[in-house]
Image (cartoon, rainbow, N blue to C red):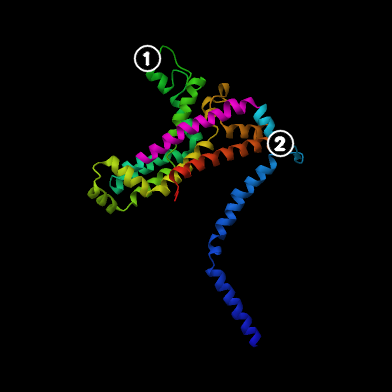
Amino acid sequence: MENSIGGNRQFKHGLKRLADSPYLFILPYSLLFTLLIILPVTIAMAMSFTYFNTVQAPKFVGFQNYIDLFTGDTVFLQHAVTNTLMYAVIVGPIGYMLAFMLAWMLSQVPHKIRTIYTVIIYSPSVTGPIMMTVVWRVLFSGDQAGYLNYWLLNMNIIQEPLQWLKSPELLVPIMVLIGVWGSMGVGFLAMLAGLLNIDKTLYEAAYIDGIRNRWQEIFYITIPSMKPQMLFGAVMAIIGTFNASGIAATLSGGTPPPQYAGWLIVDHANDFGFVRFEMGYASAVTVVLLYIVILFNKISYKLFGDNK
C-alpha cells in the first residue's frame, strides 16, 4: 500500500515537473518547425544530389546538378539569377521604406481612420501577386480597350496601342511596380505596431535634450526604439521578394515570358520540378536560392540586429 502511494506521489511529481518545464511550451513550435522547415530543407538538400523524375527511384549523381546549373544552364545564370537579384534589390528596399513611411504616417492619425487605411494598404498583399496581375492585365492590355492605351491614345501621346505585356523592356518595370504595390504585408503591420508602442516620454525627453524636428525624431528615437520590428520587416521583405514567382508569366500570358523577361529563380525551379519533372535539378535550384536568402538575411541582421 505504501509503495502504491509512493508511486502515485512520484508520478504526480513527475507530471508537475513536466508541466512546469519550459520545453513543454516550445514543443508545439519545435514539432511544426521540424515538420515544415527542417525536414523539407533536408529532403531538398539530399534530393539535389540525385536524378529524380518522380517515377523511378532517385539516382545519386553527386554534384552533377550543381555543375550543370552553374556551367551549362544559361537561362539560370543570365535570366533567373539576374532578374531575381534585380527584383529583390529594387522591390525589397523600396517596399521596405514605403512600408515604414506609410506606417509612420498612419501612426499619426486617429484610431478609427488608421484602421480603415491599414486595411486598404494591407489588402493587396492578401490577394497575392498572381491575383493582382489579373487585375493589372486589364490596365496594361495591349489593344485599344486597355485602360492605359485608351487614355494615351485619347491624349495623342501615342499613335498606336503599345504591347505593354509582350515587350521585355516594358514587362519588367510593370512587374516591379506590382511587386512594390503588393509589398505592404506583415512587415508593414509589424512596423505599425512597433510605432504605436513606443514610449511617448522618449520624445518629450529628446526635445528637452535638443531634438528640433521630425527627421531627428525619426532617426534618433523612432528607428532605434523599434529595431525588432524593423528587423522583422526586413526579413519578411527579403523572403517575399526572393519567393516571388509567376508574375511575368501571368502578365504576359505565357510560360516562359518573352525572352525570359522577369523569369525568377522560383520560376526556374517550378519549371524543372513541375513541368519537366526533374525534381533533383529543381531541388538544386532551391538550395542555391536558400543560400542567397541566408546571405541577405545576415546583412539585415547586421543592419537591424542587436550587435552588442
> What type is the residue that disc 2 sits on?
Phe
Let me know if residue 86 is in the magenta part. yes
Residue 150 screen position, x and y as percent: 40, 19
157 in relation to 186, above or below = above
Q: Is residue 3 left or right of residue 259?
A: right
Of callouts 1 and 2, the N-terminal one = 2
Membership of 130 in magenta stretch: no
Asked if the residue at tag 2 contacts the one at tag 1, i.e. Cβ–Cβ closer than 8 Å, the answer is no
Q: Main secondary structure of the magenta part?
A: helix
Could you tell me which residue is drawn at 44 percent across and 29 percent down?
Answer: 177
Q: What's drawn in magenta, residue-wise?
A: 73-101
| Apparent side of residue 308 relative to residue 114 in the rendered image (left or right) | right
Residue 285 placement, left or right of 183: right
| Viewer-nearest residue: 221 or 41 | 221
Residue bearing the label numbered 2: 63
User: Label 1: which residue?
Assistant: 157
On the rendered structure, is 30 left or right of 199? right
